[in-house]
Amino acid sequence: MSVLDEKPLPLQTLLRVDSVSMSFGGIQALNEVSFDVKAGTIHSVIGPNGAGKTTLFNVITGAYVPDRGRILYEEQEVQGRKVHELVRQGIARTFQNVELFGSMSVLENILVGRHVRTRCGFLGAMGRWSWVKKEEVEAKRRALELLEFVGLVDFAHHRSEDLPFGWQRFLEIGRALGADPRLLLLDEPASGLNAVETQRLGDLLERIRGQGITLLLVEHDMSLTMGISDLIVVLHQGRKLAEGTPKEIQSNDEVIAAYLGSDRESFP
């Protein structure tokens, strides 16, 4: 059998959400939600406002502990672990609202993201040993490399709050990449972007996937979501309504009714 005749190996499951439920008082934010995210894919979560998307992200990244269910990352249960522990394990995220250190430079914001991959603590900084200086040089080199990757290297020494809003979005993604994640969660990254910036974002996300990083995306921009996603999960009132390829989701009558209304033309 030739190489061309060989079947591709099945993708490994990187993240498993297993029957996860989460409530706040009398509000059931998530109800028995389950799905798998395969390594090397772009997996999106869509749904109306209040469907539970951000709650799901907060459970996966350790901000919330689910009432029931499991989160498995690289086949290990991680629910209940601290946020910084999960970042060290390779899970990073961005937020709906841009969360930058406005008075810091663009470069310094990336270096904050690199902190989790350095060994130097307070005593190391005080001692200024040779290994500390070497680590600082390497962190700066990697930070500049990431700024080049997201298209902001020419603004490395500008204050982050002086950047246009769209560029701040790209900086936040660069900072998350500074942690060298294997799984990157992006919460509405296209929010507030114009059409040109959204196109640039789609290109960036494809390039991130090309670096071997798995993406889990919450997004309301359907053109972007349908254009780059391998699989899509649809949440509605805290439950998983559907899961499938963009083509399957576009033709799902339940999704059209619940998320987009009855107008099939709403889909791109």
Image (tube, rainbow, N blue to C red):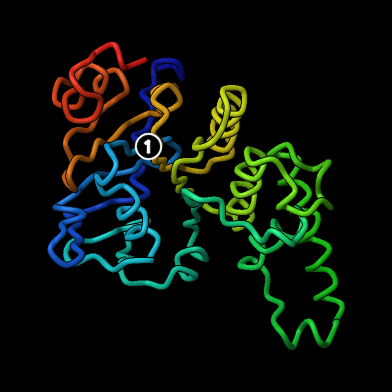
Q: Is residue 16 above or below residue 200?
A: below
Please name the residue shown 64% across and 41% down the image.
165
Which residue is painted at 49% across and 53% down in the image? 93
Q: Is residue 19 left or right of residue 142?
A: left
The answer to whether residue 149 is left or right of residue 55 is: right
Looking at the image, residue 145 sits to the left or right of residue 12; the answer is: right
- Closer to the camera in the image, 88 or 51: 51
Percent position of residue 161, x then y:
71, 52
Above/below status of 64 relative to 167? below
Q: How many marks?
A: 1
- Residue 255 coordinates in the image, percent (x, y): 19, 27
The answer to which of 123 and 31 lies nearer the viewer is 31
Q: Image quadrant of residue 112?
A: bottom right
* Percent of width and height locating residue 73: 36, 57
Residue 75 in which image quadrant: bottom left
Amino acid bearing label 1? His
- What residue does disc 1 label? 43
Task: Pinpoint residue 239: horizontal percent, then vertical percent.
Answer: 16, 45
Q: Quadrant of the C terminus?
A: top left
Relative height, residue 139 to residue 191 (above, below): below
Q: Residues within 10 Å of mark 1 (few under 14, many from 20)?
A: many
| Residue at the spot 41% in from the left edge and 40% down from the top edge | 217
Quick one: which residue is furthest to the top in this view? 265
At mark 1, the secondary structure is strand
Q: Is residue 144 above or below residue 64?
A: above
Identified at 45% across, 68% down, the residue is: 83
Q: Quadrant of the N terminus?
A: top left
